[in-house]
């Protein structure tokens, strides 16, 4: 995986972890999560550490939440289960 691909996956996982952790159900909440994402680390090692953190956060949130809990997904009201399915397809 290239650094660019690793960064894109990391941002994606951090975004969805933020949606899940913060109980986001609105476009405004999703925009706030997006705005709060960190900047890209310099160097592969730092990027790999952030990627592992993102993976751990997303996995942890998915393990804690039930599929029927409401959350924002792709501009609409959805559930944790819908986000789980979206991530499984990705």
Image: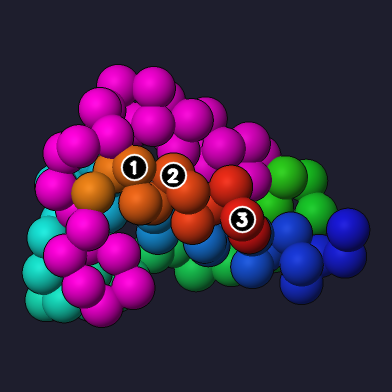
Asked if the residues shown at circle 2 and circle 1 are in contact, with their CB atoms under 8 angstroms apart, the answer is yes
Q: CA distance from mark 2 to mark 1?
A: 5 Å
Q: Which mark is residue 63?
A: none
Question: Residue 21 in the image: x percent, y percent?
Answer: 24, 41
In the rendered structure, which segment of residues is drawn in magenta?
Answer: 49-78
> Mark 1 sits on what residue?
81
Q: Left or right of 38: which side holds 4?
A: right
Q: Residue furthest top?
A: 64
Residue in view at x 44 percent, y 44 percent: 84
Residue in view at x 30 percent, y 21 percent: 64
Q: Quadrant of the C terminus?
A: bottom right
Q: Which mark is residue 84?
A: 2
Q: CA distance from mark 3 to mark 2?
A: 9 Å
Question: Residue 79 in the image: x percent, y percent?
Answer: 23, 49
Other residues around mark 3 within 10 Å, as few (<14) / some (14–19) / many (≥20): few
Q: CA distance from mark 3 to mark 1?
A: 12 Å
Q: Nearer the viewer, residue 39 or 77?
A: 77
Residue in view at x 35 percent, y 51 percent: 82
Question: Residue 68 in the image: x percent, y percent?
Answer: 20, 37
Q: Residue furthest right?
A: 1
The numbered mark, 3 or 2, whose residue comes first in the sequence reads: 2
Is 44 in the magenta? no
Asked if the residues shown at circle 3 and circle 2 are in contact, with their CB atoms under 8 angstroms apart, the answer is no
Other residues around mark 2 within 10 Å, as few (<14) / some (14–19) / many (≥20): some
Secondary structure at numbered mark 3: helix
Question: Residue 67 in the image: x percent, y percent?
Answer: 28, 34
Q: Left or right of 69: which side holds 5?
A: right
Q: Is residue 36 visible?
A: no
Secondary structure at numbered mark 1: helix
> Mark 3 sits on what residue?
89
């Amino acid at each position: 995986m290239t650094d660019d691909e690793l960064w894109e996956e990391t941002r994606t996982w951090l975004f969805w972890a933020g949606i899940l952790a913060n109980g986001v159900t609105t476009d405004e909440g999703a925009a706030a999560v997006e705005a709060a994402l960190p900047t890209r680390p310099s160097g592969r090692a730092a990027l790999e550490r952030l990627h592992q953190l993102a993976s751990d956060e997303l996995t942890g949130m998915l393990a804690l939440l039930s599929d029927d809990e409401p959350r924002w997904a792709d501009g609409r009201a959805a559930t944790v289960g819908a986000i789980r399915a979206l991530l499984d397809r990705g």
